[in-house]
């Protein structure tokens, strides 16, 4: 067994991260043992591609979902090996007399700031041409109330998973 295969032997190809392949491939040198490691790495990459690459980047069939009841400070964050296309957002002000101002953020980076009228809603078309929004691990989509009663805020997100 080569050094590279030894380092990856407890991982299945479905859960194997590209970063793990890159990490074990970094210390490979063109010596006699290195040639065997390079051949092993090439076989591992080909095997990984056979599982992940045929439909890479396309929407996974039957993966559409809706996340409801999103409160202030919450949102949607993909896990390892997940890529999500957000296709629609709806936000509501469940209170009575005051508007709610909020920001839509990628992590802590505000991308849109807007307001919901008292007892009103806003929908995807009110955000402009930002859909679909693509998220991957480390890019959480969050809703942060900046003014008004945060307990009156709620949001919904419709999304699809992409093959990654």
Image (spheres, helix red, strand yellow):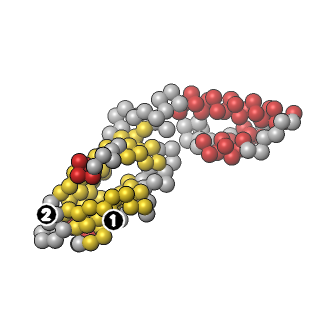
Rounded to the nearest angstrom, the CA distance separating label 1 from label 2 is 18 Å
**x 30%, y 46%: residue:** 129
Residue at mark 2: 119
Horizontal and vertical percent position of residue 147: 27, 72
In the image, residue 30 above or below residue 26: above
Percent across and percent down for residue 105 are 38, 59
- Work out whether mark 1 precedes mark 2 in sequence or the reverse, and give the earlier one: 2
Residue 140, x across and y down, in percent: 42, 55
Residue 59 visible, this orientation: yes
Q: Would you place residue 11 above or below residue 93 in this image? A: above
Q: Specify the quadrant that holds the N terminus.
A: top right
Which of the 4 image quadrants contains residue 143?
Answer: bottom left
Q: Is residue 66 above or below residue 50?
A: below
Q: How packed is label 2: few (under 14 Cα within 10 Å), some, or many (20 or more)?
A: some
Secondary structure type for disc 1 = strand
User: Residue 109: horizontal and vertical position, in percent?
Assistant: 43, 61
What residue did someone put label 1 on? 144
Residue ID at (69%, 46%): 23
Q: Is residue 47 left or right of residue 125?
A: right
Q: Is residue 87 above or below residue 114?
A: above
Instruction: Kindly identify which numbered label has been placed on residue 94.
Output: none
Q: Which structural element holds mark 2?
A: loop
- The residue positioned farthest toward the right in the image shown: 32
């Amino acid at each position: 067994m080569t050094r590279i295969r030894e380092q990856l032997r407890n991982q299945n190809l479905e859960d194997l991260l590209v970063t793990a392949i890159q990490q074990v491939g970094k210390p490979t040198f063109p010596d006699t043992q290195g040639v065997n490691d390079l051949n092993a790495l090439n076989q591992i990459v080909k095997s990984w591609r056979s599982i992940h690459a045929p439909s890479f980047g396309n929407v996974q069939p039957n993966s559409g979902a809706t996340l409801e009841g999103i409160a202030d400070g919450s949102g949607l964050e993909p896990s390892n090996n997940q890529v999500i296309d957000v296709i629609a957002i709806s936000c509501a002000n469940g209170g009575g007399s005051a508007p709610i101002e909020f920001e839509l953020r990628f992590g802590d980076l505000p991308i849109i700031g807007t307001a919901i009228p008292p007892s009103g809603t806003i929908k995807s078309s009110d955000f402009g041409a930002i859909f679909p929004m693509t998220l991957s691990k480390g890019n959480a989509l969050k809703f942060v109330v900046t003014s008004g009663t945060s307990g009156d805020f709620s949001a919904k997100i419709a999304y699809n998973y992409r093959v990654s």
